Image (cartoon, helix red, strand yellow):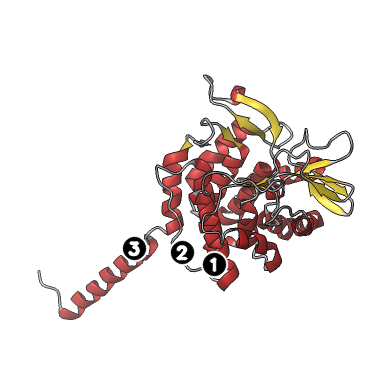
Amino acid sequence: MRFPLKVGLAICVVVITFFLLYSWERKAPSVFENSWQQYKELFVEDGRVIDTGNQNISHSEGQGYGLLFAVEANDEKGFEALWRWTQSTLQRSDKLFSWKYVPCARHDASCITDPNNATDGDILIAWALLLAAQKWHNEEYKLASDGILSVVEQKLIKRAEGYTLLLPGEYGFVNSDGSIQINLSYWVFPALLAFSEITGNPVWSQLYRSGTALLDKARFGQWTLPSDWVIFNDGEFSLAEALSAEYGYNAVRIPIYLVMADDEQTPLFTPFLAFWKQAEVPATVNLQDGSVAPYSYTEGMRAIALATQSYTHSRGKETLNLPIVSAKTDYYSASLILLALMSLSAESHY
């Protein structure tokens, strides 16, 4: 049967419109979404993020990063699986999370070898839950985030010498002489901004301001860089008894957190930018004696450097030629790459 010309044209318009709308709804995955899929294939198993560079253990930091990346990629099912494992296996009765899980025969909480928390993991998880609650309108995630933050405030925030400090864990970081061991990379600046905005609790903005003030003062060595760990005592900073006197695998996260928080305090970036200008950038540098690692910084560290340089030089969000996540990338380096990618997204400044 033949249709009249006008009817046929109308049908064509409807069909074309349908396919355009369908194509728009099923747009090509972003660079971040593709990277997240690769990350999941390499490092996530039944909701557990596997640290392939550290004997395949899992920890609260890794779960926090996994949850955060799942939200950014709009992967609700992936997020649900990650949260289910994190909650059932790592979450303690006080709402914080045991930091270290070593695979064992039972594949449950009996595999936890250190029940102490790691505060950066707690903060990352709480932040991811808060973002998930906003994106997917899930009140349970918001309540879970609130519960974690309440305990972080109660147990892990300490005021001393005019600063609001963040203890790296509940146990083991306040010494008998009153000195405190801190890790400035545990100040996840974009998370603190989000907590301040959503909860209205001034403690998070106080913690943010103290973190940037500490970064301005706790600098060491030729490069005036922050160390992975530092001792704070009577208003002074020391590396003498610190867990590590190096700038390296911890402190490298600091500049990307500042970028993600859209913090334009240029002097805070200066030592990192200077350090990265070297022809050969070492992975670590000892801030007491100046010695450097005999190997170059990792692809993840390079991604952090590139994203930070882009931000400070142009304030732009353009796509850079960042390293990619591949089978050769270990968990931590891949996590740094995804953080760098997040920082380039206009939606990453929460």
Discs 3/1, front: 1
Q: Residue at coordinates 57% horizontally, 56% vertically from top-left?
A: 135
To which quarter of the image does residue 22 belong?
bottom left
Q: How far apart in space, not on screen, are marks 3 and 2 (Cα)?
A: 30 Å
Residue 117 spot, x, y in % from top left: 70, 35
Residue type indicated by callout 2: Leu
Is residue 70 in view from this perspective?
Answer: no
Q: Kindly identify which residue carries mark 1.
A: 310
Q: Which mark is residue 320?
A: 2
Which element type, helix, strand or loop, lies under badge 3?
helix
Q: How far apart in space, not on screen, are marks 2 and 1 (Cα)?
A: 8 Å
Residue 219 spot, x, y in % from top left: 74, 55
Q: Residues within 10 Å of mark 3 (few under 14, many from 20)?
A: few
Circles 2 and 1, Cβ within 8 Å, touching? The answer is yes
Q: Kindly identify which residue carries mark 3.
A: 22
Instruction: Looking at the picture, tell me which residue is in the foreground, 96 or 274.
Output: 274
